[in-house]
Image (cartoon, grey):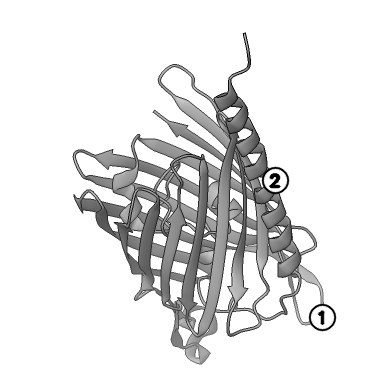
């Protein structure tokens, strides 16, 4: 029997897509090295803006309009009605300079046209060397910055959805210096066609840290507030029907900074995805770009679908990049 010409063409098309994907990824990485330095990372809540999970971070966090695969309400609460199965995920970050970054999430659709998600972000720095005025070691300190998120989304029409995230922010900075406040995110999704999706989100509405140092410094202490920069994003994703590919991009206004993100995902074989992206391409500021690469392996076990996801983020000013490992389970 002769070879199936249709199967041969699909294989060739897949190879061509992978070549284009890798070429674009390498070009993005090369381009990112041209970016200069300076950043918005000094503003309040910087760890909360690093991303969520290996999939999103591997795609440069350009996830505002992505509505297929493992979805995270962190990027846009309007995506949760598009989640087809209950999904739980846990992420562990391996970062340099004694930093930590971890995530937990659970997302479930509510029939017929709604969904909700519970998420936790845990970040911080450990092994901080405390010393007295004479330079003698006194203690080892650590910080813990956390966000607890509840997201709900509804799809009133087949091609339109909106959602809301309420978040509690807790920061333990030092002995007796802690902050517990709240913030809100709002997002929408609009399917322009079967292949194109538009998304928009406003994040960190009213989010801030409130500090009171009177317990530490007595009468010399004072009260202050550090506001998160308001995040406004608009994104577009393209998912062609004939290929298992996602290409996404977005534009964000982050305080006074304007940045662009881009990401892509290709299923090279059944259950095997490769990803690449670039985060925070500066438009009007000297923010260093962060390229990223990733891979995921997914299989079917009875009625469960577990997957392992990995991302590597090239991080400026750090001796090494970030390794992000996620385990997701659909059931």
Quadrant in the picture for residue 137: bottom right
Q: How many marks?
A: 2
Q: Where is residue 218 in the image (x, y as percent from the top left)?
A: 50, 85
Q: Nearer the viewer, residue 227 or 285?
A: 285
Question: Looking at the image, which residue is at 63% across and 13% down?
Answer: 2
Residue with the mark numbered 1: 134
Residue closest to the eye, 307 or 269:
269
- Quadrant assignment, res 263: bottom right
Between residue 190 and residue 165, name the one nearer to us.
190
* Residue located beneath label 2 in the image: 19
**Which residue is depicted at the point 32% across and 57% down?**
192
Q: Does residue 26 appear anywhere in the picture? A: yes
For the residue labelled by badge 1, is the local secondary structure a helix, a strand or a loop? loop
Q: Is residue 140 above or below residue 225?
A: above
Give the side of residue 105 with respect to residue 244, left or right.
left
Which callout, 1 or 2, points at the residue further toward the start of the chain?
2
Question: For the residue carrying disc 1, how many other residues have a C-alpha within 10 Å: few (<14), some (14-19), or many (20+)?
Answer: few
* Quarter of the figure that contains the C terminus: top left
Whether residue 174 is visible, yes or no, is: no
Separation of residues labelled 1 and 2 (CA atoms): 59 Å
Q: Relative to 19, is 291 above or below?
A: below
Q: In the shown orientation, is residue 244 left or right of residue 288? A: left
Quarter of the picture containing the N terminus is top right
In this view, the mark in front (1 or 2): 2
Q: Where is residue 173 in the image (x, y as percent from the top left)?
A: 55, 69
At which x and y percent is residue 10? 58, 32
Image spot of residue 202 (x, y percent):
36, 70
SS for callout 2: helix
Give above or below for 175 relative to 75: below
Residue 257 horizontal side relative to residue 182, left or right: right
């Amino acid at each position: 029997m002769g070879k199936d010409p249709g199967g041969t063409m699909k294989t060739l098309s897949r190879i061509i897509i992978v070549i284009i994907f890798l070429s674009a990824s390498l070009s993005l990485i090369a381009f990112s090295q041209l970016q200069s330095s300076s950043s918005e990372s000094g503003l309040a809540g910087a760890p909360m803006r690093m991303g969520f999970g290996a999939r999103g971070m591997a795609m440069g966090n350009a996830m505002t309009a992505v509505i297929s695969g493992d979805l995270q309400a962190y990027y846009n609460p309007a995506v949760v009605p598009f989640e087809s199965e209950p999904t739980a995920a846990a992420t562990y970050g391996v970062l340099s300079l004694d930093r930590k970054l971890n995530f937990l999430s659970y997302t479930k659709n509510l029939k017929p046209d709604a969904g909700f998600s519970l998420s936790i972000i845990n970040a911080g720095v450990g092994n901080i060397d405390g010393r007295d005025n004479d330079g003698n070691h006194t203690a080892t300190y650590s910080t813990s910055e956390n966000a607890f998120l509840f997201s709900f989304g509804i799809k009133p029409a087949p091609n339109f959805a909106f959602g809301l995230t309420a978040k509690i922010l807790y920061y333990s900075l030092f002995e007796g210096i802690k902050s517990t406040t709240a913030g809100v995110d709002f997002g929408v999704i609009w399917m322009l066609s079967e292949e194109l999706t538009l998304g928009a989100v406003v994040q960190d509405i009213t989010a801030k840290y409130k500090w009171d140092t009177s317990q530490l410094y007595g009468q010399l202490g004072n009260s202050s507030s550090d506001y998160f920069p308001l995040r406004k994003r608009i994104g577009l994703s393209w998912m062609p029907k004939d290929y298992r590919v996602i290409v996404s991009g977005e534009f964000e206004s982050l305080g006074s900074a304007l940045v662009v993100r881009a990401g892509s995902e290709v299923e090279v074989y059944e259950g095997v995805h490769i990803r690449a992206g670039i985060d925070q391409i500066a438009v009007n500021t000297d923010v260093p770009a962060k390229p990223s690469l990733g891979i995921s392996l997914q299989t079917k076990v009875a009625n469960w679908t577990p997957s392992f996801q990995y991302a590597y983020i090239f991080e400026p000013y750090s001796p090494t990049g970030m390794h992000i490992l996620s385990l997701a389970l659909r059931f």
